[in-house]
Image: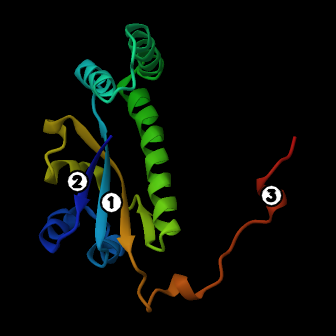
Amino acid sequence: WHFYIIDNDAAKDKILPAIAEFNQPRVTDSSHTILFCIKSPLEDAHLVNLLNQEEKDGRLPSSELKQTQDESRRFFVTKNSKTIESQQSWEGKQTYLALGQLLFAAAAIGVDSTAVEGFDCDKMDEILELKRKGLKSLVIATLGYRSENDGNAHRPKSRLPKEQIFTFL
């Protein structure tokens, strides 16, 4: 993955044409907007770079462990890369794990957040020239503190009953 951090008005204005109108206030009113991107395509050079960084960071103290790490990673990349669509789907799932962690971490420190899929990925990719950089936009998260005018903040949550969403085996 790769992240674009948008934390100023000029950057917000730049990406705003790709944001659905109903989501634009989420971006303009945020302190930070983060664009989550995936590698497209996921190239061998990136896998080599990851492995080299892990070795540099001391995670791979032996050549055997380095080889095992490389083989394991390549197993999953190969398994999930039969087509560019399957590769992007898998990378998307991995990226949504990072999104979930960001949303959870923000809540843990009292920062409000919103995940945003309401944007034109192709337009965003064009605005930021992502294809040229081997990237594809996937999802956005906005961070900040909710407005007193936020209607969602004053309405009760609505959830399906637990019996409809959980099955205990």
- Mark 2 closeness class: few <14, some 14–19, many ≥20 residues within 10 Å: many
Q: Which mark is residue 119?
A: 1
Q: Is residue 96 above or below residue 163?
A: above
Left or right of 59 in this view: 164: right
- Cα separation between marks 2 and 1: 8 Å
Identify the mark nearer the N-term, 2 or 3.
2
- Cα separation between marks 1 and 3: 31 Å
Q: Residue at x 37, y 69 (%)?
A: 143
Q: Which residue is mark 3?
A: 164
Identify the mark nearer the N-term, 1 or 3.
1
Left or right of 141 in this view: 75: right
Q: Quadrant of residue 146?
A: bottom left
The extreme bottom residue here reads 148
Q: Residue at x 40, y 58 (%)?
A: 117
Task: Pinpoint residue 23: horizontal percent, then vertical percent.
Answer: 35, 71
Which three-letter amino acid code belongs to the residue tagged 2?
Met
The secondary structure type at the circle numbered 1 is loop
Task: Pinpoint residue 167: horizontal percent, then vertical percent.
Answer: 83, 48
Quarter in which the N terminus is drawn: top left
Q: Which residue is mark 2?
A: 124
- Mark 1 closeness class: few <14, some 14–19, many ≥20 residues within 10 Å: many
Q: Is residue 89 above or below residue 46?
A: below
Left or right of 8 in this view: 90: right
Which three-letter amino acid code belongs to the residue tagged 1?
Phe
